[in-house]
Image (spheres, rainbow, N blue to C red):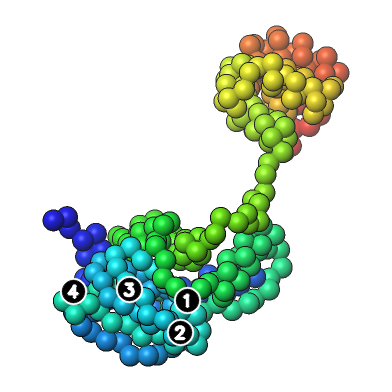
């Protein structure tokens, strides 16, 4: 018999609840009130009750039943359901088998903010509205929201780097995954899509800036973008007909040389080699052609004290 993967969560059942977790998501503030794994022994009854907050119920093991509204539903491993504020519900473990339940209690309060990513705001709004309208019927945990509980516990227990941020993301994941369990396949809001022409051009520029002191060719930059060198050449021509790939690379290297000439006493020969030019003679030729003076003259005119 395989080990129950959530067993570790019984060791410190209140560990996640000790964290003061407040999440800004779009124009909502989500506060975590309860976040734990509990177990109902065989035959245990939790009589009709309701909460002022949202309660997410997930069944990782065992079986039982729940009454939501006027209907009774069987519960078994891998199922979930949501009770919103004021929803009366009754729970009961099977007479012969215990039922474990992962519980997340959250309040969700509208809190408009300036400067929120519009796509994040739209997705948060879509999710919260769906949560308010979910049917009072258990569903299968198709998107594995349960795993988020264990990930949050392990991150907190191990004090993993950034664990508090990770847990906040996992709380949002639980909300989204529970919502998805009820999705009927309709098309929701589309995520933002990159302009691939601009994206590839900008990525190429960033790569060239980061590697300008080494050997940089049209071919190896195109390879990084998983496109052909001809495609990359066309992208540069489309974005700026007057600045070919080689011209942009030369500009980047000259800017780096100028910075060194302004800020350091390093010999020009050394600067040339460190910034991607073959030697000082070649740098001298390019510099005079592009800036109308020698590197030494530029240094004398621009070097700071």
**Residue 130 picture quarter:** bottom right
The residue at which mark 2 appears reads as 69
| Near-viewer residue (244 or 72) | 72
From the top left corner, tell me how far across and down residue 231 is, in percent.
69, 20
| Near-viewer residue (20 or 7) | 7
In the image, taking residue 123 as reference, residue 55 lies left or right, namely left
> For numbered disc 2, what is the local secondary structure?
loop
> For numbered disc 1, what is the local secondary structure?
loop
Q: Of callouts 2 and 1, which one flags the residue occurring earlier in the amino acid sequence?
A: 2
In the image, taking residue 4 as reference, residue 102 lies left or right, namely right
Pointer 4 with pointer 1, Cβ within 8 A = no
Q: Residue at x 30, y 87 (%)?
A: 46
Q: Nearer the viewer, mark 2 or mark 4?
A: 2
The residue at which mark 1 appears reads as 136
Measure how far apart labels 2 and 3 are at the Cα level.
14 Å
- Quadrant (top left, top right, bottom left, bottom right) of the N terminus: bottom left
| Near-viewer residue (125 or 156) | 125
From the top left corner, tell me how far across and down residue 72 is, in percent.
37, 80
Q: Of callouts 2 and 4, which one flags the residue occurring earlier in the amino acid sequence?
A: 2
Residue 175 visible within the image:
yes
Q: Residue at x 46, y 65 (%)?
A: 178
**Callout count:** 4
């Amino acid at each position: 018999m395989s080990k129950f993967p959530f067993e570790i969560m019984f060791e410190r059942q209140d560990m996640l609840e000790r964290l003061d977790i407040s999440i800004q998501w779009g124009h909502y503030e989500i506060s975590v009130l309860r976040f734990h794994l509990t177990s109902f022994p065989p035959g245990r009854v939790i009589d009709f009750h309701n909460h002022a907050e949202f309660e997410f119920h997930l069944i990782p093991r065992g079986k039982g039943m729940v009454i939501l509204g006027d209907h009774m539903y069987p519960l078994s491993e891998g199922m979930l359901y949501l009770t919103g504020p004021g929803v009366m519900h009754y729970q009961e473990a099977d007479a012969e088998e215990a039922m474990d339940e992962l519980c997340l209690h959250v309040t969700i309060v509208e809190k408009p903010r300036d400067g929120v990513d519009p796509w994040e705001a739209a997705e948060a709004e879509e999710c919260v509205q769906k949560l308010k309208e979910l049917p009072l019927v258990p569903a299968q945990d198709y998107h594995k929201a349960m795993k988020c509980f264990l990930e949050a516990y392990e991150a907190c227990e191990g004090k993993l780097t950034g664990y508090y941020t990770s847990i906040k993301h996992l709380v949002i994941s639980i909300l989204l995954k529970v919502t998805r369990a009820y999705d009927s396949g309709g098309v929701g809001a589309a995520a933002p899509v990159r302009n691939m022409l601009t994206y590839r051009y900008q990525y190429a520029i960033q790569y060239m800036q980061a590697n300008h002191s080494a050997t940089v060719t049209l071919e190896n930059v195109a390879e990084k973008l998983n496109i052909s060198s001809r495609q990359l050449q066309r992208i540069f021509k489309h974005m700026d007909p007057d600045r070919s790939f080689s011209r942009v690379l030369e500009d980047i290297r000259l800017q780096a040389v100028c910075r060194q000439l302004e800020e350091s006493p390093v010999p020009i020969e050394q600067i040339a080699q460190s910034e991607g030019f073959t030697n000082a003679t070649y740098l001298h030729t390019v510099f005079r052609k592009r800036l109308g003076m020698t590197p030494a003259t530029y240094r004398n005119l621009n070097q700071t004290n």
